[in-house]
Amino acid sequence: MPEDLNWAVGGEAGDGIDSTGKIFAQALSRAGRHVFTSKDFASRIRGGYTAYKIRTSVDELNSVVDRLDILVALTQRTIDENLDELHEDSVVIYDGERSWDAEVPEEQIALDVPLKSLAEDAGGAIMQNVVALGAACEVAGFPIEHLDSALEKRFGDKGQKLVDNNQEAARKGRDYVQENYDHDFGYSLDTTDEDYVLLNGDEAIGMGALVAGCRFYAGYPITPATNVMEYLTGRIDKYGGTVVQAEDELSAINMALGAARAGARSMTATSGPGIDLMTETFGLIATSETPLVIADVMRSGPSTGMPTKQEQGDLNMTLYGGHGEIPRFVLAPTTIAECFHKTIEAFNLAEKYQTPVYVVSDLAMAVTEQTFSPEEFDMDAVEIDRGKVVDEDSIDQYLDEQGRFQPHYDAADGVSPRAFPGTEQGAHMTTGLEHDELGRRTEDTEERVQQVDKRNRKVETAQREEDWSPREFGNAEAENLVLSWGSNEGAIREAMQDLDVDVRFISVPYVFPRPDLTEAVENAEKTVVVECNATGQFADLVERDTLTRVERINKYNGVRFNADELRDRITETFAAESEATA
Amino acid sequence: MSSQAHFTDFKSDKRPTWCPGCGDFGTMNGMMKALANTGNSPDDTFICAGIGCSGKIGTYMHSYALHGVHGRALPVGTGVKLANPDLEVMVAGGDGDGYSIGAGHFIHAVRRNVDMTYVVMDNRIYGLTKGQFSPTSREDFETSTSPGGTKQSPVHPLALAMAAGGSFIAQSFSSDAQRHTEIIEQAIEHDGFSLVNTYSPCVTFNDVDTYDFFRDSLVDLAEEDHDPTDYDQARQKIMDFDNIYQGILYQDNDSVGYEKRLGIKEPMNEIPDGAPEGAMDLVREFY
């Protein structure tokens, strides 16, 4: 595994944990280091333990690990919650002057820094977390100038004075450790000349939407999808679009549908409970052949479940949800950068095939900030395909003998022409009722079969004409096969760096249509499917598709997989095989 | 408009399946006339409807239209108008669609004040499911699901709209073709959300709220000294549950449609062929 440092700041919700962590992550990123962050948090505004964790290395990082080297603890609970991850060289920074008596286990190095007093000296107690960052720089052997740059970014628009005060506060923390602890902590963080950007999965979805030409977003706030809406707010306007905060998810998806019918590239994002509410309209979107992108940023369910915890429990929901048989596409980006690319792909698929498209992401990606080279977001490679849109000049060929536009014309490839409202001679209706080619209600048996076949034929056309390839890692000839969908890719890739067994890893970003894995599964001695749910929803699909039994590695305690545990569990799974066959 | 549309241009070649004598015929005719009289054409009009007898209207009219799920026609209309403010958006529904399953959206559509016209065909009964009480049914109204009366107070849609900050609140009667058409014309011309609650009698399942009942009880505000721009006068009339009125009860002349307040100027249907110019700036923000 890469040589890394694991750092965290924790306290009560409301202590500014998030922004403190983000500043440090930004400082590391600006120093040309890779960063992979995670969060422990609860669904409340104040009170309750929360932590922001950063893993950093000069090498690429794709996972969390279960080790903490430096912990800034603003509460005792922060220490207690992380005992398992602390080791004998771990350093715990805390403020001994505060009302709580910190009990740092003897094995760890306790660094008592008067964060609050030093912050007051620098201009205000509110900067105590920044004092801690300065202290952390000293412990980690990280040049404080990079922290300066991050503080500049964070506070620059609020005036130079505030920037100066914060930079001063950071120095007080650093100096205090220098003067009071004559100790070599053994850490040194190298910097590089690389320029990285630091973003999370929700931001990547939002940026993908903007780049794809999304002009309308309607949503209702829900963890962990809200960040998509917050990202688009204030940015989409610059492109002539808008964000509407609807009164509920039912309204949100119907507004998005209305905008799509009007010809805008349109989307909504939500999490499981919101998908439940949107499902009736999902059927209408498919039946009325309206292009729409719906991002499901999964969290732990069912019902309210664990709103701030990770789970990949919505696969069946997005694949099968809704009464009747609903054609759809389900994309599941496997990394944060892929959240960007798959969102663009989703808009093209939606419009080319006039079909709803789910982009299924999850909490692990939504709350993780990860560094990428800007080239990962290659804007020159972005292609926009709006499908069969007709205008005043081309509409003639799509009118019936009575001059009526046929929005559900039974085309050979299943894809009918589309006329945006305002197009002359294009006036037409559509409906969630079964309809004829003109979009008018029918219960005629032949027309029913024609329209069902036509809608399904779009999916067949897409299956044939689009690229649904998975991503491959490891040794393609290996007899051990690891399969996964969605966000587990990074942790599995890192686990593979330390595996004693030789594996082939296929990471699947498409739930429907999905790549045919039959040959890969048949060629393998043993296949294991890794996913963050209890029942193995993707494993069930693989078994059904390939008619072969697979092993399963599941996790459903609300915490994402990390590379360490996957290394052990994958090894165990394949070792069990060799024993069995021996 | 390039050429003046005639109201029959808004008629589709599908024959309505409404019962003979249904109020919805008159309601729809008034909508078509009002659309034509205000200079709209089928190609720049969008009709949204929900479920129920009222929901069928998109099939019988000719324009761009979406017949959606039950109770959600207002959000659809909102999306259409925001995405293309050049379109004339009209939403049609019934008392069940708008005031029962869609009541939540009704309140928020009123206060959001998007420039569209909402015509509610209020017959105080569920017709398509063959005669159950609706949210506007009287308390003593006996139906298959309310054998001893509904035992609950009816919704007062105009009062709900006023409480939600409505900027145009009106009521009409499908059988008074001229007044109904005039009222919808003014609703179309209003900048903001216009509610027109249209009494549209069900001749099959409602033997209480009949044509005769409405003819006898409706008080036309045109014959009264009513100033719809006077909030207090409007409030008095709207909260007077002992009488029912025809006409514009309230209109806020300073109303500005939500789409204008959001600064939306152009239809959103044109986008670049690739990533927008300067797209790398979006990436650099994350530096």
Image (cartoon, coloured by chain):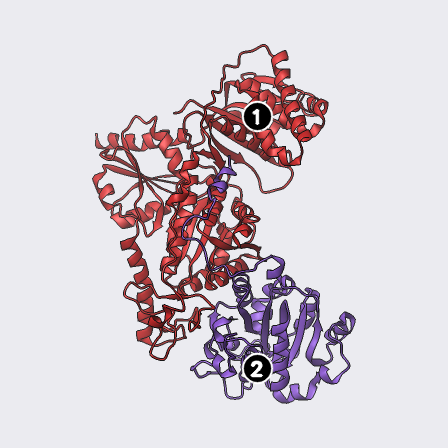
Chain colours: A red, B purple
- Which quadrant of the figure has residue B246? bottom right
The image shows residue A32, relative to residue B274, as above or below, that is above
Which circle marks residue A471 in the picture?
A: none
The image shows residue A478, relative to residue A408, as above or below, that is above
**The residue positioned farthest toward the front in the image shown:** B2
Q: Measuring from the top left, give residue B126's x and y in whole percent.
A: 55, 77
The residue sitting at 51% across, 82% down in the picture is B6
- The front one of B151 and B111 is B111
Q: Do labels 1 and 2 share a chain?
A: no
In the image, B214: left or right of A475?
right
Q: What residue type is labelled 1?
A: Leu
The image shows residue B182, relative to residue A266, as above or below, that is below
- The front one of A141 and A397 is A397
Q: Measuring from the top left, give residue A516's x and y in whole percent.
A: 26, 48
The image shows residue B10, relative to residue A407, as above or below, that is below
- Numbered disc 1: secondary structure: helix
**The residue positioned farthest toward the top in the image shown:** A182
Q: What residue type is labelled 2?
A: Gly
Q: Mark 2 points at which residue?
A: B30
Q: Measuring from the top left, give residue A547's x and y in whole percent.
A: 25, 48
Chain letter of disc 1 in the image: A
Chain letter of disc 2 in the image: B
In the image, A272: left or right of A475?
right
Q: How far apart are marks 1 and 2 (CA)?
A: 68 Å
The residue sitting at 70% across, 28% down in the picture is A125
In the image, A456: left or right of A194?
left
Which circle marks residue A147 in the picture?
A: 1
* Residue A75 visible at all: yes
Q: Measuring from the top left, give residue A487's x and y in whole percent.
A: 41, 40
- Numbered disc 2: secondary structure: helix
In the image, B121: left or right of B160?
left
